[in-house]
Image: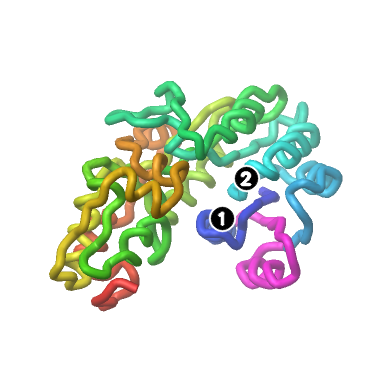
């Protein structure tokens, strides 16, 4: 399959590119400059230098592809990009996999694709794009909704691993759960959705591992030999440190299983749980021994 991919040098998109190539797909990666073009070409993709808001360029590239995967979803670029892709693919039945986010469901101890949205301020912009993709006719539009992504020593968990002076600083008091997914497992879900996902369907990418932030912090302290343990903070302190909108998203208490993706697409989450990787000190690299 010829696939147009955005975000191919980003955290999620680079893993998606690797998975697409491993499964025999030809990838054209939209990138912003020549330096990024060299990166994706080294990974086996054909580079297309341009911007997600260039509707003529996007339309031409989408029309030439057998499917589109959009991991570079942003409030500034989604309107133009999604509109151009939907026009180019109209009536073709080709797949278009868009990216959502678990935070859009708000608090919940058993979040599924049927859970009503309760978007925090940080993600209110996602609604219009998701609705456009899922409601499009003549296109096999889908949304993959990642949980908190970890793996390859990166991801938002670095907010905890990088704040370890005098103990691991938590986000709030740490009682909230974070639904998690490994970045390479998530990439496999994007490819399965592209190949076999249903029109108008959303698939939550979640491992079923939903540790509390305190559990994550305690695992970091164990794995990296931080004798001071963890340092909770108040909501006000977290908001002051990270900004209100970002903090309020991180303070959401969320649990999800990813059961639909498993049942309908045969997807599997095979990576070791994040807590285990943190607790044995290997998350930032084998034998890291200390938080960066």
Residue 291: image x %, image y %?
A: 29, 72
- Determine which of the numbered discs, if any, sits on residue 237 in the image: none
| Residue sitting at x 66%, y 48% | 1
Residue 60 counted in the magenta span: no
How are the colours assigned in the image?
Answer: rainbow
> Residue placed farthest to the left in the image?
227
- Depth order, front residue of 152/232: 232
Span highlighted in magenta in the image: 24-46
Q: Are marks 1 and 2 in contact (CB under 8 Å)?
A: no
Q: Secondary structure at mark 1?
A: helix
- Determine which of the numbered discs, if any, sits on residue 13 in the image: 1
Closer to the eye: label 1 or 2: 2
| Residue sitting at x 35%, y 57% | 157
- Which quadrant would residue 94 be assigned to in this image? top right
- Determine which of the numbered discs, if any, sits on residue 74 in the image: 2
> Residue placed farthest to the right in the image?
56
Residue 9: image x %, image y %?
A: 60, 62
- Depth order, front residue of 199/273: 273
Mark 1 packing: few (<14 Cα in 10 Å), some, or many (20+)?
many
């Amino acid at each position: 399959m010829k696939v147009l991919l955005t975000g191919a040098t980003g955290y999620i998109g680079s893993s998606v590119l690797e998975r697409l190539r491993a499964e025999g797909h030809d990838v054209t990666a939209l990138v912003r400059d020549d330096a990024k073009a060299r990166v994706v070409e080294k990974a086996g993709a054909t580079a297309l230098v341009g911007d997600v808001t260039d509707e003529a360029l996007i339309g031409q590239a989408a029309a030439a592809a057998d499917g589109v995967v959009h991991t570079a979803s942003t409030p500034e670029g989604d309107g133009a990009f999604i509109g151009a892709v939907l026009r180019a693919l109209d009536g073709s039945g080709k797949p278009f996999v868009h990216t959502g986010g678990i935070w859009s469901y708000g608090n919940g101890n058993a979040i599924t694709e049927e859970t009503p949205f309760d978007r925090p301020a940080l993600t209110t912009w996602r609604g219009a794009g998701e609705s456009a993709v899922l409601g499009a006719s003549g296109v096999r539009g889908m949304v993959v909704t990642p949980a908190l992504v970890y793996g390859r020593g990166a991801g938002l968990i670095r907010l905890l691993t990088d704040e370890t002076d005098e103990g691991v600083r938590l986000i709030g008091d740490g009682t909230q759960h974070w639904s998690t997914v490994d970045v390479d497992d998530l990439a496999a879900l994007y490819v399965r959705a592209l190949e076999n996902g249903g029109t108008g369907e959303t698939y939550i990418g979640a491992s079923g591992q939903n540790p509390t932030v305190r559990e994550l912090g305690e695992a970091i302290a164990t794995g990296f030999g931080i004798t001071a343990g963890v340092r909770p903070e108040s909501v006000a302190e977290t908001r002051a440190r990270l900004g209100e909108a970002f903090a309020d998203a991180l303070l959401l208490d969320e649990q999800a299983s990813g059961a639909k993706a498993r049942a309908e697409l045969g997807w599997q989450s095979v990576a070791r749980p994040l807590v285990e990787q943190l607790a044995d000190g290997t998350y930032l690299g084998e034998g890291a021994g200390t938080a960066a």
